[in-house]
Image (tube, rainbow, N blue to C red):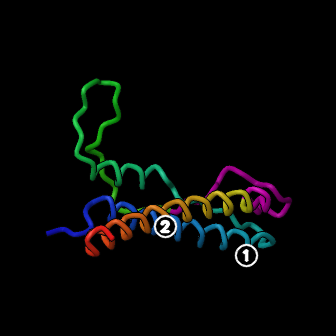
């Protein structure tokens, strides 16, 4: 019996994604003055493909997104074609701070959803009281 279900697994993966994104942003900020450093991004599309592959869905139209694509993990890629500083560094501190704020909101939304799941289980185990 799967007590937590697939949605909890997907929420766990969402937290993993948010954690990796936070580490990547922190690494970019720490290297803001490093000559030649290329800022990195965590690719969300692979995470979305992985999460959607776990959904059980039927395509009813050819223009609907397919659900059978599956990627195994997140990937961190350097932004190769962008240079913001004269020393070859591609870290834009304003952009990194904006991404950090967005990631924090995402993390809080996911943790709130997980708390809701556990509160539901707690209510069921307590007999609805």
**Front-most of 122 and 70?**
122
Quarter in which the N terminus is drawn: bottom left
**Front-most of 65 and 9?**
9
Residue in the picture at 24% in, 26% down: 60
**Front-most of 7 and 89?**
7
Q: Is residue 54 magenta?
A: no
Q: Is residue 84 magenta?
A: yes
Quarter in which the C terminus is drawn: bottom left
Label 2 secondary element = helix
Label 1 secondary element = helix
Residue 39, which numbered label? none
Q: Which residue is mark 2?
A: 111
* In the image, residue 98 above or below residue 1: above
Residue in the picture at 59% in, 73% down: 23
Q: Spatial distance from mark 2 to mark 1, Cα to Cα?
A: 26 Å
Residue 30, which numbered label? 1
Kindly indicate whether the residue at mark 1 contacts the one at mark 2 (C-beta within 8 angstroms).
no
Please state the horizontal and vertical placement of residue 124, each as a whole percent of the image.
27, 68
Residue in the picture at 79% in, 58% down: 94
What range is drawn magenta here?
A: 76-95
Please state the horizontal and vertical placement of residue 49, each as a whole percent of the image.
37, 49
* In the image, residue 82 above or below residue 96: above
Please state the horizontal and vertical placement of residue 39, each as a whole percent of the image.
67, 62
Dominant SS in magenta: loop
Please state the horizontal and vertical placement of residue 52, each as a whole percent of the image.
33, 48
Kindly indicate the quadrant of the structure image that contains residue 87.
bottom right
């Amino acid at each position: 019996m799967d007590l937590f279900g697939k949605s909890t697994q997907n929420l766990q993966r969402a937290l993993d994604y948010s954690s990796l994104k936070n580490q990547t942003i922190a690494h970019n900020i720490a290297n803001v003055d490093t000559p030649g450093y290329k800022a990195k991004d965590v690719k969300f599309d692979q995470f979305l493909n992985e999460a959607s592959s776990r959904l059980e869905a039927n395509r009813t139209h050819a223009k609907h997104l397919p659900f059978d694509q599956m990627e195994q993990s997140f990937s961190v890629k350097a932004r190769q074609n962008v240079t913001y500083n004269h020393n070859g560094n591609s870290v834009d501190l304003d952009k990194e701070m904006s991404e950090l704020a967005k990631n924090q909101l995402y993390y809080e939304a996911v943790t709130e959803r997980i708390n809701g799941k556990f509160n539901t289980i707690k209510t069921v185990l307590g007999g609805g009281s």
